[in-house]
Amino acid sequence: MSDIQPRFQTIDGLSIRYAESAPGKPDALLLSPWPESLYAYDATWQQLEEHAHLIAVDLPGFGHSELREDLLSPRAMGEFIVQIADAFGLEKPHVVGPDIGTSAALFAAAAHPTRFRSITIGSGGAAVPSDLGTPLHEWVHDEDLAPYKALGPKDVVNIAMDAIDGYELPDLVRQDYLAAYHGERFVEQMAYVRAYPTQLPELSDLLPQITTPVQLINGKNDAVVPVANAEYLHERLPNSKLTVADAGHFVWEENADAYARALIEWWQAN
């Protein structure tokens, strides 16, 4: 039985799924990675809720939240993250946005320099020129999407979940990930990362201006998003810390104790 109890709230006309821990301080807004959901924090939830008021959210179009095409890019998603914080009355939260949340959270911090107390990101595409592993490179750059449309809606999730190293997903979590996929939802979501070639260079120009404290956590064995992406950000952000964990891509599950410890220590320092 998970401590995560999902609910739904309408934000900007969209049905957004979230889960919340008991009230407390500080506030922490946890964003879903891809192709997972807010249950990606199941392995760390008990530790994290002892130190913060948690609100975990399936970003629009991901997990079990409603999709809207105009939000499927890092810059647009960054603005929606601010709307999420506003909707939940989070005055100045810590933001945790691994994977696709990396670029979105940075766009948000660039546009709203005093909105967040800190950001923890990583395992997300960032480097210019592109430095992505398999299968993300193909998802971003393949011209023909027909093979992806031909996949069963749950095939990509099963492939991704089988790549999690050293952590057996609880059945509840695996089933939640799978239940998020139907029809061509995965192909629709690909628009987000396919915006990288255009938007990551724009983000790169903004990095030196971002004053929000940023913690970067990346698995040293990440074959999907090599650690070079986190190093790229660390070199360019004026107020950042880089943690390279003993894990692959899904560091928040593969090395949950180290991930939770890094978050808690970061929150206490910021």
Image (tube, rainbow, N blue to C red):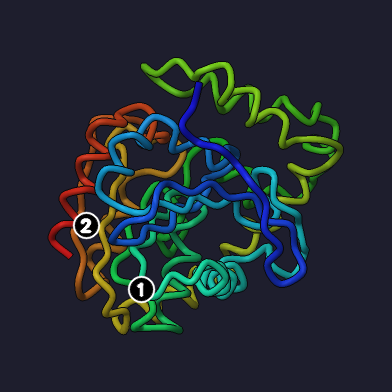
Is 120 on the left-hand or right-hand side of 203? left
Location of residue 167 (image quadrant): top left
Which sits in the foreground, 36 or 172?
Answer: 172
With respect to residue 93, does 164 lie above or below?
Answer: above
> What residue lies at 63% left-to-right and 65% top-to-bottom?
73
Secondary element at tag 1 = loop
Callout 2 crowding tier (Cα within 10 Å): few <14, some 14–19, many ≥20: some
Which sits in the foreground, 152 or 168?
Answer: 168
Secondary element at tag 2 = helix
Quadrant in which the C terminus is drawn:
bottom left
Labelled disc at residue 44: none
> What residue lies at 58% left-to-right and 50% top-to-bottom?
18
Residue that label 1 marks:
92
Is 149 on the left-hand or right-hand side of 123? right
Q: Earlier in the sequence, mark 2 or mark 1?
A: 1
Real-space Cα separation, disc 2 to disc 1, in angstroms: 12 Å
Location of residue 126 (image quadrant): bottom left
Q: Are marks 2 and 1 in contact (CB under 8 Å)?
A: no
* Residue 168, position as x, y percentages in the image: 45, 15
* Residue 268, position as x, y percentages in the image: 15, 57
With respect to residue 191, does 152 lie above or below?
Answer: above
Q: In the image, what residue type sits under mark 2? A: Trp
> What residue lies at 49% left-to-right and 19% top-to-bottom?
169
> What residue lies at 53% left-to-right and 70% top-to-bottom?
78
* Residue 112, position as x, y percentages in the image: 42, 83
Which sits in the foreground, 148 or 58?
Answer: 58
Labelled disc at residue 267: 2
With respect to residue 99, does 222 lie above or below?
Answer: above
Is 112 on the left-hand or right-hand side of 199? left
Number of numbered discs present?
A: 2
* Residue 8, position as x, y percentages in the image: 67, 51
